[in-house]
Image: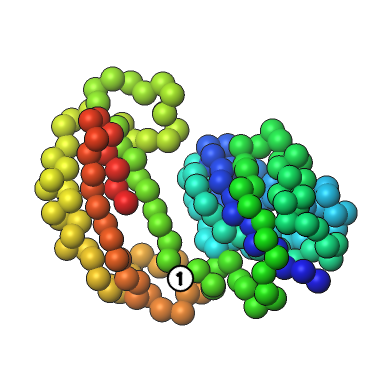
Amino acid sequence: MPRYKLIIEYDGTPFSGWQIQDNAPTVQGALEQAVKAICGEDVRVNGAGRTDAGVHALAQVAHCDIAKHFVPGRLRDGLNAHLRPHPIGVLAAEVVPDNFEARFSAIKRHYLYRITNTRANLALDIDRTWRVPRRLDTDAMHQAAQRLLGKHDFTTFRDTECQAKSPEKTLDQLDVVRRGDAVSIL
């Protein structure tokens, strides 16, 4: 049975996060419904990580095992057709070895936090950026962020049921960048 790696993006606004929940729309649930629509079987779609309610993804990695063989581009297109009207896009699909696990094969994760530093109300980016009306000292923020670089124990921030091998994580990069009113933390 082939294993497929999927690269997906989504607007998390209408979802209660990645992971399937009873009586709540989720990204994983929408993807699994789309897979079932094209292959007629219940298939678990495993993500590299779980996002919370309202969180967006630009290149989330997932994998699934489907008994039917698909040309990867056709799988991508079929999933996209069945994902409408959900704000989810499958950007790429590829066949990967059976030992590929979206979560455990990941070696890095990248995050982007957006702030709009303006007194004006947001209209177009209301669900994609945090509006902070007071002027932010981004130079001081960047300088403080550099103290977080390196390996740290995040036990305090772990869920009691966390399955990660170690509470230690390494922050390789943490930058605060201003471009006009736009502040990015990456």
Q: Is residue 156 above or below residue 56?
A: below
Q: Is residue 180 left or right of residue 164?
A: left
Q: Amino acid at mark 1?
A: Ile
Q: Identify the residue shown where x is 52% and y is 61%.
A: 49
Please tell me in which quadrant of the rendered image residue 182 appears: top left
Q: Is residue 117 left or right of residue 90?
A: left
Q: Identify the residue shown where x is 61% and y is 48%.
A: 91
Q: Identify the residue shown where x is 62% and y is 73%.
A: 100
Residue placed most toward the observer, 166 or 68: 68
* Residue 177 seen in render: yes
**Image coordinates for residue 64, horizontal then vertical, percent:** 71, 63
Please tell me in which quadrant of the rendered image residue 144 appears: bottom left
Dot 1 lies on which element? Answer: loop
| Quadrant in the picture for the N terminus | bottom right
Q: Is residue 172 left or right of residue 33?
A: left
Residue placed most toward the observer, 64 or 28: 64
Q: Identify the residue shown where x is 26% and y is 57%.
A: 174
Q: Circle 1: is it few (<14), some (14-19), or many (20+) Cα within 10 Å? A: few
